Image: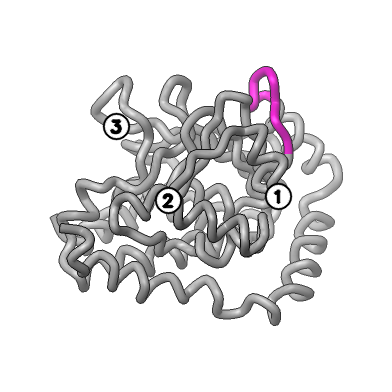
Amino acid sequence: MTFVRIVSLWGFEMGDRFRHLRVEEQRGYWVVVFDRAGTSTAPNVLSLDALAELRVIVEAVERRADIAAVILAGAEGRGFIAGADLREVHGLTPREALAFSRYGQELFRRIESARSLFIAAIDGYCMGGGLDLALACDLRYATARSVFAHPGARLGLLTGWGGTARLPRAIGRAEALRLFLTAERVSAAEALRLGLIHRVVEENVLAFARQRAEAAFRRGPQTLAGIKEALRMATSRLHEGGSSRGEPLRFCLECSSDVA
């Protein structure tokens, strides 16, 4: 397995059949459901192929001015995303690991800066790379049973997909440092208190996210895009370059004796 294998998916079009994602197109918004291929019960993970498929979707959204929102969710019973595919990560060479880190980071940066509103509808595990993806979204809604964590400290890994910059922005440096160092799991109620998520939804979180996406479309895609751009410009100088600093750190950790 090599990193260059992801290139094989770059030719996908929206009408093609994805193996890791399901895409539902509604008027004014899309729903993207992570549904891990090849198994009916295992949690969703972000493999190389899953990232490549997500990139195809993001590129398609970037070409559409009429898409007000994109909802990211996990298939029922699989949680949101439990993290990166560690079997793939441990099979990468140091050079491939760094390329994988940069690939995911660039993709998440595009999600964060997209004109469309990205909404994470979380039900279950949202950990590691899955939490990094959720943090790149504009809004995060979760069920009461959802669980959040950055477990890298237990694995000898550090997120390379922008979490080291986005998590402190969301919940503050002190709390982010605690979660990174302890690899502690956080409940939805605690995540709400910290500011990690925007709301705990008691019923169907995907249905709630659909309501928000429909409301976003009614307000107008251009209006939302303008608001996002104004906020991005106001904060970009404060945070510019921060999301890239986790790359060499993660690279060093993966090559250290702590991983053995």
Residue depicted at x 41% and y 26%: 78
Residue depicted at x 65% and y 38%: 190
Q: Nearer the viewer, residue 190 or 164?
A: 190
On whether residue 54 falls in the magenta region, the answer is no
Which corner quadrant of the image does residue 114 belong to?
bottom right
Local secondary structure at mark 3: loop
Residue depicted at x 15% and y 55%: 91
**Which is in the foreground here, disc 3 or disc 2?**
2
Residue holding disc 1 = 66
**CA gap, disc 2 to disc 1?**
29 Å
Q: Quadrant of the N terminus?
A: bottom left
Work out whether mark 2 precedes mark 1 in sequence or the reverse, and give the earlier one: 1
Residue holding disc 2 = 129
**Which is in the foreground here, disc 2 or disc 1?**
2
Q: Which mark is residue 37?
A: 3
Position of residue 194 in the picture relative to residue 107 (left or right): right
Tag 3: amino acid: Ala
Mark 2: few/some/many CA within 10 Å (<14, 14-19, 20+): many
User: Quick check: can you spot residue 134?
Assistant: yes
Tag 1: amino acid: Asp
Local secondary structure at mark 2: helix
Q: Nearer the viewer, residue 81 or 246?
A: 246
**Which is in the foreground here, disc 3 or disc 1?**
3
| In the image, residue 64 above or below residue 217 | below
Tag 2: amino acid: Gly
Magenta highlight range: 199-207
Residue depicted at x 62% and y 25%: 144
| In the image, residue 52 above or below residue 24 | below
